[in-house]
Every structure is written in C-alpha cells, then in structure tokens.
C-alpha cells in the first residue's frame, strides 16, 4: 500500500495539540513530512486579476514569473522600467502592448486606471510615490518591502489605504513560507506552552553580503535603506508575528567591521580584474563569484547566447561596482548586527544578522514553558517537556522548492497566490501581511537603527 496515502489522516500530538496539516509520510519514528492544506477561502476565479509592474528587475521578474505560470490567475498588462533590456524582456514575456509600456512609474499614472493592481518592485526609495498614487487612483497594491525608508511615509501609506479601502500587501514573503506558517500555527496552539523567549539568526552568507551590501544595490544605507530594514525587516517581522504580542523596547548594536579599506590585503587592486595579486586566494573575488561560478549573474542583463555570456560578465566586472574590490567600495552597511527586543508580558527576543557564514536561510529557537522548538527552514524539531517526546517536521519539498522562481522557502509565489485571491475577492483577510499587520515590525527596524546610532535603549510607540 502507498505509504503516503496510508499516513494521510494520522494526526500528530505535540504538547497537547493535534497538528492539523496533512501528514504525507513518516520519515523516521518521530519524523514526518507534512503539507499545508489548501486554503478553504480560495475560490475559482472567473477571470484573471490584471496588474501593472513598476520595476522589472529581480523582484518584478519573480512576481511576473508567477503570472507567466498561472495565466488564469494573474495577467500583467503594463510595465514601467527605465532599463530597455528589462522593459523589452518583460513586454515580450507578458505580451504587453507598446501603449502600456513606460519608462518610469510616473507615466503609468498619467493614464486612467487600466488594471486591478499595481506591483511595486522599484528600488527602496521609489516605493512611497507610486504607492500613494496607486491608492489615490483606486488600485490595489503588492508592495515590496521595505514599505518606505521613513516611518512617516509608512504611516501615510497605512492611512491612505484605510481611507481608500484598497488592499496593500507588503511582501513579507516569509509569512507565506510553509515552514514559518507551521511554526506560527504550532506556537498559537501552545505546542511549547507559553513562549518565554526567542533566538533568531539570519545568516546572510559571506558572498551574498559582498554581492548585495558591499558591491551591489544596497551598499549605501543613505541611498537605499539601513540593512536592518533592507535585509532584516523580514526577520523582525517573523519574530513579532510568531510571538504575537506588541513590541515594547529595543536595543541594537552592530558595525561595519571587515569590508573596509584598512583590511585590504597587500597586492589588492581597485578591481579584481586589475591584476590583483591575491585574487586567487580571496573568498570575495568577483572573478570567482560571477565569472567562474556564475553566481547571482541576473544583475548583469546578459544575452541569451551562452557563448557570449563569459565576455559580457568580464565586461561588467570592468565597468560596474560588481568588479570592485570589496575592501575599496564606498559601502557603509554593518556586516554584523544584533538586537534585543522586549515584547508584551515580558517575552524577549534576540536577533543576530551575520554576514560571515558559509550558509544562508534562517535559524530559530523558541523557548517555551512546556517545550522548545528548533528550526533551520528545512526542518522544525519540537520537544515536549511533559512527555519527553521529540517530533521532527519536514515541509514537503515541492512546497519549498517546487516553484521555479520562488525563493524564501516557497513564500514568494505563495504570497502572489494569496494576493491574487485577495484582489479577486476584494478580501484583504486572505493575506497575513497587509500593511496594518506589517507596519509594527518596520517601526521596530526604525527604532533598532536609532538605538544602534544613539547607543541607547528605545521605547517603541
Ligand atoms: N521581498 C523580498 O524578499 C525582497 C528581496 C529582494 C529585494 N526586495 C525589494 O524589492 C525591491 C526591488 O528590488 P530588486 O532586487 O528587484 O532590485 P532591481 O534593481 O533588480 O529592480 C528594481 C528595478 O526598478 C527599476 N527602476 C528604477 N527606477 C525606476 C522608476 N523610476 N520607475 C520604474 N522602475 C524603476 C530599475 O531599473 C530596476 O530594474 C527593493 O525595494 C528591494 O529592497 C525584496
């Protein structure tokens, strides 16, 4: 008999709670593969939701990818993107007529409303303007995080969404990842008793740090947003979401310690391609990362012809920030950042963002009165103090990796799916990351950064 079918209806008991998800397979004695059941609020759609994408870069392509694979749910009918290569690529994938292709977001709003929703995947400092305009014109909005680099602008967007009654879904994609959905459900059901404290680690991975926060788009906190908002707003958001109590106080420390000129090795040069004497032994070599490993090369807008790509990459390494020495950049983002938060009922949390790791993902430990939970996004291990029993839960691989472009533990496309349903049904409760639900963790980030800079403890209002 098929083992998966056999185990489908078995409930697992942890800390006096029965797990409601379908168990797909028993992997070992106390280890189970599970799936999140289909959302009963999802309904068949008479016609696809239509959307206009502002910013057809990396994130615009992720949500566009969902539309391309799910054409009965989401249709992209317009795009604003100043880089011709990206505008052309997007228009081709989604068959967007020339009349609906624009260079910059402002142009979209010069036309009367011509879609249900706007997808805002422009750089951090270009979220507020298009979001306010979209709401004024009656669009629903899928808004990339951070909502805005300023607390006042975040609150303006919240106020306007309430005034207009439009949906604003913030792309806190981890809230949709089956792993975190399960963590939240178990904690809400009391699987570890009362939550006493949380420890959460965000290992960035050293080469990702070099790519995004030393050489890349977010190397300058002043031109974009501080790293606690740009990178770790997901993490403070998940901590707040699972604890489910108001945040009260926060303190933060951290600095840019390594990627500085004084740490540049003797023999290093302005660019890795300038004949750097230590390039072969340097873990941050751009030649190794981009030319040899072809890691994160989507930023280079390469031609489809693989034979030409090597020369194109070398050209970018000689002409863009991606080829510059990591010790000689004009970067200012901290490479290690810790923050402690006190929530209501004296629940506490510790968060660490660490650049210097060989691995990525997230690691979380939850300490409860009746049990504890340890997870790394590939499995969640729950120990029940009363029974001494340990249970390991593993999300179904397809939920996490099955979608081609869906990163963040599967959360990217699962958010897109819930957003489409919310717009189609005009029901924001299908989303867990509405602007109302998301704003507090942004405020925590603003307060953390203020604490780090002022060297003082902050009360969160
Ligand atoms: N949710 C997440 O996990 C996640 C992950 C990465 C990035 N982000 C956020 O998503 C946003 C986009 O990031 P990205 O990685 O896609 O960056 P990106 O640089 O790949 O894409 C941004 C695009 O916006 C375009 N653009 C610039 N000015 C514009 C204008 N005036 N009008 C229209 N388009 C304009 C750029 O040319 C670029 O193609 C950022 O705010 C970023 O912080 C979120």
Image (cartoon, helix red, strand yellow):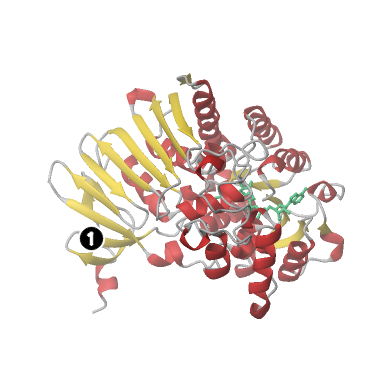
Q: Is residue 343 left or right of residue 136?
A: left
Residue 423: x and y in percent read: 64, 51
Left or right of residue 18: residue 412: right
Q: Is residue 105 left or right of residue 438?
A: right
Where residue 385 sits: x, y (%)? 15, 41
Q: Quadrant of residue 442?
A: top right
The residue drawn where x is 76% and y is 54% is: 115
Q: Position of residue 51 (x, y in %)?
A: 71, 56
Seen at 46% across and 37% down, the residue is 236
44 to 192, vertically: above or below? below
On screen, residue 36 above or below 196: below
The residue at the far left in this view is: 387
Q: Would residue 196 appear left or right of 93 to someone viewing this image? A: left
Residue 73 visible in the picture:
no
- Res 429 → quadrant: top right
Q: Nearer the viewer, residue 231 or 287?
A: 287
Residue with the mark numbered 1: 31
State the image coordinates of residue 414 (x, y, percent, origin top left).
Answer: 51, 57
CB at disc 1 and ligand 1 closer than 8 Å: no
Res 202 seen here = yes
Q: Residues within 10 Å of mark 1 (few under 14, many from 20)?
A: some
Front position in the image: 294 or 119: 294
**Label 1 SS:** strand
For the N terminus, the quadrant is bottom left
Q: Nearer the viewer, residue 104 or 136?
A: 104
- At 13% from the left and 41% from the top, the residue drawn is 386
């Amino acid at each position: 008999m098929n083992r998966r079918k056999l185990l489908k209806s078995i409930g697992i008991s942890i800390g006096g709670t029965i797990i409601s998800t379908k168990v797909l397979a028993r992997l070992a004695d106390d280890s189970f593969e599970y799936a999140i059941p289909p959302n009963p609020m999802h309904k068949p759609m008479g016609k696809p939701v239509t959307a206009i994408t502002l910013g057809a870069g990396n994130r615009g392509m992720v949500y566009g990818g969902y539309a391309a694979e799910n054409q009965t749910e989401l249709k992209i009918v317009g795009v604003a993107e100043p880089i011709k290569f990206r505008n052309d690529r997007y228009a081709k994938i989604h068959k967007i007529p020339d009349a609906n292709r624009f260079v910059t977001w402002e142009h979209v709003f010069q036309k009367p409303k011509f879609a249900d929703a706007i997808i805002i995947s422009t750089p951090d400092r270009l979220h507020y303007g298009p979001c306010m305009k979209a709401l004024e014109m009656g669009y629903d909005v899928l808004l990339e995080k951070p909502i805005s680099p300023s607390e006042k602008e975040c609150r303006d967007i919240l106020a306007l969404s309430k005034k207009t009654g439009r949906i604003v879904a913030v792309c806190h994609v981890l809230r949709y990842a089956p792993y975190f959905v399960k963590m939240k459900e178990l904690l809400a059901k009391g699987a570890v008793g009362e939550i006493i404290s949380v420890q959460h680690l965000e290992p960035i991975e050293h080469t990702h740090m070099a790519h995004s926060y030393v050489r890349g788009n977010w190397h300058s906190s002043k031109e974009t947003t501080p790293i606690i908002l740009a990178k770790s707003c997901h993490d403070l958001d998940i901590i707040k979401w699972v604890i489910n109590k108001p945040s009260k106080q926060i303190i933060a420390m951290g600095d840019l310690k390594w990627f500085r000129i004084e740490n540049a090795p003797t023999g290093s040069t302005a660019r890795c391609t300038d004949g750097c004497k230590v390039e072969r032994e340097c873990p941050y070599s751009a030649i190794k990362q981009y030319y040899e490993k072809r890691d994160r090369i989507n930023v280079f807008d390469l031609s489809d012809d693989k034979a030409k790509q090597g020369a194109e990459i070398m050209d970018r390494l000689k002409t863009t920030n991606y080829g510059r020495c990591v010790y000689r950049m004009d970067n200012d983002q901290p490479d290690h950042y810790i923050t402690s938060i006190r929530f209501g009922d004296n629940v506490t949390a510790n968060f660490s963002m660490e650049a210097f790791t060989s691995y990525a993902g997230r690691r979380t430990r939850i300490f409860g009165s009746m049990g504890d939970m340890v997870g790394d996004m590939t499995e969640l291990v729950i120990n029940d103090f009363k029974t001494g029993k340990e249970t390991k839960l593993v999300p179904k691989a397809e939920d996490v990796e099955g979608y081609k472009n869906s990163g963040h533990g599967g959360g990217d496309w699962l958010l897109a799916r819930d957003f489409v349903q919310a717009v189609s049904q005009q029901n924001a409760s299908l989303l867990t990351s509405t602007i109302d639900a998301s704003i507090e963790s942004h405020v925590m980030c603003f307060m953390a950064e203020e604490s780090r800079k002022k060297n003082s403890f902050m009360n969160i209002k």
